[in-house]
């Protein structure tokens, strides 16, 4: 029984860690937007309506720090910066799809 409790505790800790990053507003939408192709900051701002520049910048830095997003700088002129999903980020896409399907089936839209 102790092994099951330890496994459950480890799983709970991992889920808590995942949601500490993915549960923040906008992060799921940013990952989803990058699921189709790499994008510039402006492209992401267009793909995630309602997000401010400051929040997008913070979220991209956080997702990069977590190893989900990769920031690439192309030498210029002009210098170009783009963002893409890392391997870990790409592995999140089917999970986000499943989460979205679950939400559609089980949750009422916010009013």
Image (cartoon, helix red, strand yellow):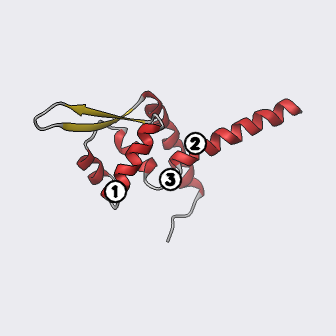
Q: Tell me how far mark 2 sits from mark 1, CA to CA.
A: 23 Å
Q: N-terminal of the two: label 2 or label 3?
A: 2
The residue lying at 49 percent from left, 36 percent from top is: 92
> In the figure, is residue 46 to the left or right of 91?
left
* As drawn, 108 above or below 45: below
Q: Residues within 10 Å of mark 1 (few under 14, many from 20)?
A: few
Q: Residues within 10 Å of mark 2 (few under 14, many from 20)?
A: few
Q: N-terminal of the two: label 2 or label 1?
A: 2
Return the residue at label 1.
Answer: 54
Q: Tell me how far mark 2 sits from mark 3, CA to CA.
A: 10 Å
The residue lying at 26 percent from left, 53 percent from top is: 46
Q: Nearer the viewer, residue 41 or 97?
A: 41
The residue lying at 70 percent from left, 37 percent from top is: 11
Q: Tell me how far mark 1 sits from mark 3, CA to CA.
A: 15 Å
Element at label 2: helix
Q: Which mark is residue 89?
A: none
Confirm or deny contact between disc 1 and disc 3 (CB under 8 A). no
> In the figure, is residue 46 to the left or right of 98?
left
Q: Nearer the viewer, mark 1 or mark 3?
A: 1
Indicate the position of residue 47 as horizontal and vertical percent values: 30, 51
Return the residue at label 3.
Answer: 24
The residue lying at 45 percent from left, 48 percent from top is: 28
Q: Which mark is residue 18?
A: 2
């Amino acid at each position: 029984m102790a092994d099951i409790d330890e496994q459950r505790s480890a799983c709970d800790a991992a889920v808590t860690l995942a949601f500490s990053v993915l549960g923040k507003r906008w992060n799921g939408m940013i990952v989803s937007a990058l699921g189709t192709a790499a994008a510039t900051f402006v492209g992401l701002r267009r793909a995630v309506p309602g997000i401010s520049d400051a929040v997008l910048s913070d979220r991209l830095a956080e997702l990069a720090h977590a190893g989900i997003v990769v920031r690439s700088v192309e030498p210029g002129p002009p210098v170009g910066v783009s963002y893409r999903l890392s391997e870990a980020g790409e592995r999140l896409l089917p999970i986000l799809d499943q989460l979205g399907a679950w939400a559609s089936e089980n949750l009422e839209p916010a009013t």
